[in-house]
Image (tube, coloured by chain):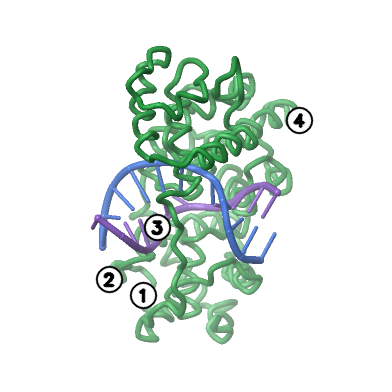
Chain colours: A green, B blue, C purple
Amino acid sequence: MSLAGAAELAGTRHLADLHRSMQRWFSEAARVLPWRSPDCSPWGVLVSEVMLQQTPVVRVLPVWEDWLQRWPHPAGLAKEPSGEAVRHWGRLGYPRRALRLHAAAVVIAEEHGGKVPDTHAALLSLPGVGEYTAAAVAAFAFGRRETVVDTNIRRVHARLVSGLALPSPSLTAAEMRLAESLMPDDVALSVSWNASVMELGALVCTARSPKCSECPVRESCAWRAAGEPPPTYTPKGQAWHGTDRQLRGAVMAVLRAAESPVAREIFERPAADLGFVADGATVPLAALHRLNSAPEQLERALEGLVRDGLAEMHDGGLRLPA
DNA sequence: CAGGCGTGGGA
DNA sequence: TTCCCAAGCCT
């Protein structure tokens, strides 16, 4: 990063101006989201943060509403079989998150009196909660001064301060130090600073085709000043077609739709004779068959799902954990 | 620590 | 059509 740039920003009047500009922009440009409501419980914030991991807001909204109505408190979810969490996760993706959220609810019910813990350390110990999520919940649900660093914030810092098109592939110690150096001292202001930088990354300072003309801090942007140089590396795309991942997703879609355990042969047989599988399961089953995977790969996918706790054997068939 | 882990919409 | 990627976590 540009140490000179960071030093110039930190501890100067310039930094206070930056905080002010961002706060003003956030107050008028921020999206209205249910988990930002003052009425939203810490549990609602935690659920939103986990759902938002690697998942766009628009897809999270309906599932979050369903979850919070169904399980307004962690204790309610804790009483359910973990498979119910997975079933109601729907097609959000990364269903292990549902499993971990359920496990977190159990820990909260049993060890925290049913209340979401309010410290970074306690949050971090919950399943599925890493550095980012712990900081985000501590800040946004409990008003704490936390150095929140997510992909949006990393990108904004990379451009605004370091003059780079994109941050490095993985989070570095230097980035954490930079993020800390930019934090307002005031607690309330620090919370809105975290939220506003994240929102700027999500709405304006986007990965592709950023809307610099709408940026409230474009005059301070090191990347813009440098002539918007291109990224210095090319992110490696994730393979999808033909992967175990794709097959696992197809199997999970079947299990979510099935009302009874699905026999192994059903996963291999054409979708025609599925009399003993619930109607709702035939569509995802047809999609699975269309993948036309090798038996060995199917075996690997099913075993992987069982190993991960996303499915279990019952009556010789596979089902969501009951 | 590099790689595995879902999904669907937009460029 | 293909590729990219969206508030990461865990091993």
Which residue carries the number 3 mark? Answer: A202
Q: Residue at x 40, y 50 (%)?
A: A241
Q: Amino acid at mark 2?
A: Ser
Label 2: chain letter? A
On the same chain: label 2 and label 1? yes
Judging depth in this view, the residue of A69 and A94 nearest the camera is: A94
In the picture of the structure, the residue carrying the numbered disc 2 is A213
Residues tagged by mark 3 and mark 1 found on one chain of the structure: yes
Q: Chain of mark 4?
A: A
Residue at image position (53%, 83%) is A5
Gap between marks 2 and 1 measured at Cα:
8 Å
- The residue identified by callout 1 is A218
Inter-mark Cα distance, 3 to 2: 15 Å
Please indicate whether residue A212 sits to the left or right of residue A184 in the image.
Answer: left
Residue type highlighted by circle 4: Glu
Residue pointed to by mark 4 = A111
Contact (Cβ within 8 Å) of mark 2 with mark 1: yes
